[in-house]
Image (cartoon, rainbow, N blue to C red):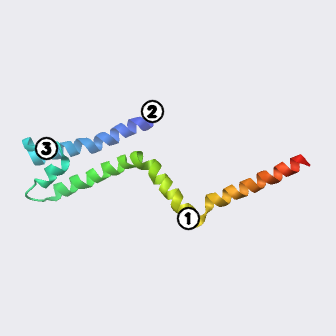
């Protein structure tokens, strides 16, 4: 429960300043698409860079949940082609199992 409360607090600490900054920068001309708003700014100030950085953090926090399975599979493929860790572990495990089966049948 403590972790859930911390997540809610941290989410509010990110989303509320972004909302207020967008209202401050764009006023009544806020579009639904965030990038349309940033593209409509005539004068690029430090506010827009802060908004972009915060948006990158928000996206980076959501991406792992969406792409975790694919990313994990891709990393396992890379690790297997370079180090063959899983293949060697499986080969060792099957050798141990085979020797245990032969010992139990004698």
Dot 3 or dot 2: first in sequence order is 2
Q: Secondary structure at mark 2?
A: loop
- Left or right position of 43 against 97: left
Q: Residues within 10 Å of mark 2 (few under 14, many from 20)?
A: few
Q: Disc 1 versus disc 3: distance between alpha carbons? A: 47 Å
Dot 1 or dot 3: first in sequence order is 3
Tag 2 near tag 1, CB within 8 Å: no
- Left or right position of 75 against 7: right
Q: Secondary structure at mark 1?
A: helix
- Which residue has dot 2 on it? 1
The nearer-to-camera label among 1 and 3 is 1
Q: Quadrant of residue 85?
A: bottom right
Q: Secondary structure at mark 3?
A: loop
Tag 3 near tag 2, CB within 8 Å: no
- Which residue has dot 1 on it? 81
State the image coordinates of residue 20 (x, y, percent, origin top left).
17, 43
């Amino acid at each position: 429960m403590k972790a859930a409360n911390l997540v809610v607090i941290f989410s509010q600490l990110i989303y509320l300043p972004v909302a207020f900054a967008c209202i401050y920068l764009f006023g009544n001309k806020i579009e639904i698409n965030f990038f349309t708003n940033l593209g409509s700014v005539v004068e690029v100030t430090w506010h827009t860079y802060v908004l972009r950085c915060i948006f990158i953090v928000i996206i980076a926090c959501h991406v792992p949940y969406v792409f975790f399975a694919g990313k994990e599979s891709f990393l396992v493929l890379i690790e297997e082609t370079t180090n063959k860790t899983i293949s060697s572990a499986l080969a060792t495990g099957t050798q141990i199992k085979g020797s245990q089966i032969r010992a139990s049948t004698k």
